[in-house]
Structure formats: structure tokens, C-alpha cells
Image (cartoon, rainbow, N blue to C red):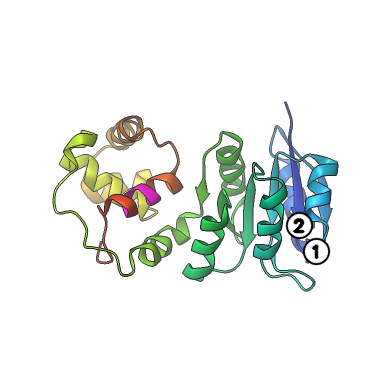
Amino acid sequence: MTCNLLLIDDHSLIRAGVRAMVLDIPGYAVVGEAADATRLPSLVMELNPDIILLDISMKETNGLDALASLLKVQPLSKVLILSMHTDPDIIMRALEMGAHGYLLKDATATELEQALNALRNDERYLSPAIAHTVINRALRGNQPARATPLAHYNLTARQLEILRLIVRGKSTREIASGLNLSIKTVETHRAQIMKRLQIFDVAGLVLFCVRERIISLDD
């Protein structure tokens, strides 16, 4: 079944670029687009998109204001913020307001596909490049990280170490190289971590680590 997308961005070149990338991703189609978000709620009701790709900074409207208006009338809408902003306050505000993901505009086609797949599967998505930024912002003023693994989650010291690296945006290959492990071993640990925590996306792992204080600003 095709996953329908609504694209809101005031730059025609950006919209054209996203459309071109979506054409190469099986199972997705852009069914509507607009240069501003003034009609976002009505467009959502008219087109019934599965995922909305929404810019933040637009000439006519502010994307976050549009997000708030949309979620008042369509609270179940899945919104992927598409932005160049890396300001942690803006990112956190978007997530706290109800956005399901945050994708930087310089993302590759592969990352766009990963983000769309995450939202399609009721998961959340953060561009790896901003994961640590989000952690730092969320931890500002919070208590220090826990010194020991959380026993009730049944994570080993090694898995906790790998978890910290995952939420910092490290790839499986980078983790394996840094810890002198095989890629298969890291993949096994990653799968076990997600199964034990019942969290299956990086954005969810980031928020879990912040909430449980198992990462710190110095990590």
C-alpha cells in the first residue's frame, strides 16, 4: 500500500528535490504540496496524507505555529519536520509540540527513506547529526547521569556503553571499530537493547536516555 505524503515548503527547488527523491523510494508518493502552511489543516482533511513533511521557516507562515494549529484539529497527524535549523531549542520545541521526527534538509535520499519508514511504522526519527544536540538541550539543568546500569531494564555494562554511542549518532561500523568488536556483535547488542527496552527507533532511545539520566553532557 502506498504511503501518501503532503509536502509544505516555500522553496520550489526543495519541493522538487524531495519529490525526485520520493520517486525513487518504493511505496511512497507525494499527493500534495504547498508553498506555505496557511491551509495546512484543510489540505490534510482534503488529501488525508499519511505523513506531512513540514518546513519551519517560511515567508507566509511559521511551521511550528502551523503544526500547533494542525494538531488541534487533527491530533493523530504524523509530521516530519524538514528544516535546516539545528538550534536545540527549536528542535525540542518541535518534538514537544508533537512532531514525530526532525530531518535536516541536507539529508541523503537514504536518510529520507529511513525517516519515512520510521514514521510509517509509528516510530520517531531524528537526524543522527542532531541527536547529541537534542540530548544536550534536554539535559540542561537536569540531574547528572546515573553511574550504574539500570538493573530493572536488564542491560549489561557493554549494552549501556553501546546505547550511549547509538544515541550520540554513531553508526554500527563506528561503534564496532571503536570498541574493537565485530559488526555482527554490535548488531546483536543493538537488537537486544531495543527488544529489552521495547524501543525500536533512535529518537525513542535518545528520549529514553534523557529521561533515565543514563547520559550526560560530558558523554
Tell me which label, 1 or 2, sits earlier in the chain: 2
Left or right: where does residue 3 sit relative to residue 94?
Answer: right
**Residue at point 57%, 45% (across, down):** 115
* Residue at mark 2: 8
Q: Which SS does the magenta portion mostly show?
A: helix
Q: Residue furthest left?
A: 148
Which amino acid type is shown beneath numbered disc 2? Ile
Answer whether residue 171 is visible to the viewer in this image: no
Q: Label 1: few (<14), some or many (≥20) within 10 Å?
A: many
Left or right: where does residue 196 sit relative to residue 123?
Answer: left
Towards the viewer: 14 or 153: 153
Give the numbered dot on residue 36: 1
Q: Which quadrant holds residue 84?
A: bottom right
Q: Residue furthest top?
A: 1
**Residue at point 27%, 37% (across, down):** 182
**Residue at point 40%, 67% (across, down):** 137
- Rendering coords of residue 118 (x, y %): 55, 39
Alpha-carbon span between mark 1 and mark 2: 6 Å
In the image, the segment drawn in magenta is 206-210
